[in-house]
Image: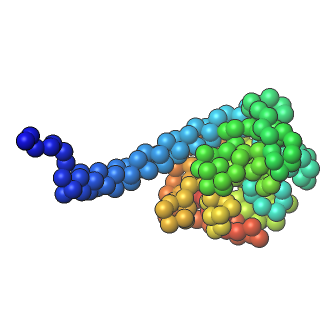
Amino acid sequence: MKKKEGFTLVELLVVISIIALLVALLLPALQSAKEAASRTACLDNLRQIGIAFRLYAYDHNGKFPNAATTSYPTAFWDLNPPGGPCAYYLLYEQGYLPSVQEYSSYWNADATIVKIFYCPDYVRNSGMTRANLLAERQCGGYVFWGGMDPVVMGGRYHCVQSLNDNAERVLAGDSVCSDPTFGCNHLGRDGLAVGGNFLYVDGHVVFVNAANLIIAANIASGIYWLPPTP
């Protein structure tokens, strides 16, 4: 009688073990590749935002649009801060950046979204849509350190006002905050910020590791960090 061919139990267990080992070896590499792609997309977002800021400034006597509020440096969304509408609204309303309509279940209505205002990691970490992030948190996914008079701000944080500011000062960037559940874009496996992409007044963007950041603001919503800047 011809012997029936097939794998033995031991052989199957060996194959399964090898597959499990390969998966364990490949997953960190795949995760690292995913994180690198996200950082690159985020960097490109900030580069486009930088172009829009500069175009706005060229049309407004060198001045950048206002930051969001007088209480924290979270950028972009507030129609009625001191001094008038802020960057998020102005840059799309005046045509410097394209916008789309996305449905917000929070508002039960469409929201005007500028996609590049949202770091991919910020959206993924929040577990929310961009429209709901805008509706609930009233801001985009980046911090804009500009527009407001530092005297009016009471010296509460680093501030950039115009194209005449030092080219090596941070204009906008990833949120790197003491509250990672609310204010951090790029998180490590331990749930803490690993660093962020930062846009400078002269338009260049770089990723800076968390270890090389310093405290830029210590306020009610948390401690915010930036690279050392002039």
Q: Quadrant of residue 167?
A: top right
Which residue is drawn at the image coordinates 62% and 64% (left, top)? Answer: 180
- Eyeballing the image, is 228 above or below 84? below
Which residue is drawn at the image coordinates 80% and 55% (left, top)? Answer: 136
Horizontal side, residue 165 vs residue 31: left or right: right
x and y, in percent, of residue 74 in the image? 74, 55
Please give the count of numbered marks on the rendered protein: 0
Which residue is drawn at the image coordinates 72% and 45% (left, top)? Answer: 130
x and y, in percent, of residue 59 in the image? 80, 31
x and y, in percent, of residue 155 in the image? 77, 65
Image quarter of the N terminus: top left
Horizontal side, residue 49 vs residue 7: left or right: right
x and y, in percent, of residue 117 in the image? 70, 42
Towards the viewer: 108 or 155: 108
Towards the viewer: 153 or 61: 153
- Eyeballing the image, is 204 above or below 15? above
Point out the residue furthest to the left here: 1
Image quarter of the C terminus: bottom right
- Eyeballing the image, is 5 above or below 151? above
Which residue is drawn at the image coordinates 80% and 45% (left, top)? Answer: 104
Towards the viewer: 92 or 10: 10
Towards the viewer: 39 or 169: 39
- Eyeballing the image, is 21 above or below 57? below
Point out the residue furthest to the front here: 1
Q: Quadrant of residue 110?
A: top right
